Amino acid sequence: MKIESLEQLFVNELQDLYDAENRILKALPKMAEQAQSAELKSAFQEHERQTQQQVRRLDQIFDQLRDVDRKGKTCKGIQGILDEGEKLMKDAKDPDVRDAAMIAAAQRVEHYEMAAYGTVRTYATLLGQRDWAQLLQQTLDEEKITDQKLTALSEDINVEARAA
């Protein structure tokens, strides 16, 4: 698809996010299952519930767009980050080291999402779609909080991984 307007760019980025969030939804249960730390397991489970809500917000926006396939794009960025994270999970034999690796992978995901949501929120604002911008800002705020929680968890888990 040629992108010739900010509206088309906005839709392109929304499709990217929609695919990203759905890929993340598939990865989070695997990560929770592999987590040694009860706190990390809980964080992944909580983020899965939150991600389901984030997909619903994207659905609200797509429902208002005409003739747009929400599943029209593959998010190669998240696909690559998740593939790397999965490989780390397999390669890390010690459970504490695996937890540290999963936090690193999860934070890469969060940073990708923060950049993407900040961008589409700005596009929505410029396009005069304040309601959409608010939905996107809500998700952006959640992603920032998740990143902060992962940072806090990493402070203990990384120490445990070092001792392994």
Image: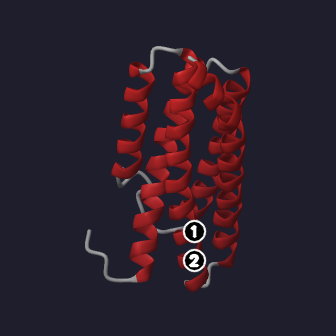
Residue neighbourhood size for the residue with mark 2, other residues' Cα within 10 Å, grouped as few (<14), some (14–19), many (≥20): some
Q: Hey, which quadrant is residue 96 in on the image?
A: top right
Residue 135 spot, x, y in % from top left: 68, 64
Which numbered circle lies on residue 147? none
Q: Could you say which is closer to the camera, residue 139 or residue 111? A: 111
Residue drawn at the location 63% of the way across and 64% of the way down: 136
CA neighbours of label 1 inside 10 A, class few (<14), some (14 to 19), many (20+): some
From the image, tell me which residue sits under label 2: 122
The residue nearer to you, when weighing 6 against 29, is: 29
Q: Where is 119 relative to 38, above or below?
A: below
Amino acid at the residue labelled 1: Gly
The one nearer the camera, 15 or 45, is 45
Disc 1 to disc 2: CB gap under 8 Å: yes
Image quadrant holding the N terminus, namely bottom left
Q: Which residue in the structure is indicated by mark 1?
A: 118
Query: Percent from the top left, x then y, of residue 140?
Result: 65, 60
Q: Residue at x 72, y 21 (%)?
A: 38
Q: Amino acid at mark 2?
A: Thr
Q: Position of residue 36 (x, y in %)?
A: 63, 17
Left or right: where does residue 103 sit relative to residue 139? left
Count of numbered marks: 2
Dot 1 falls on a residue whose secondary structure is helix
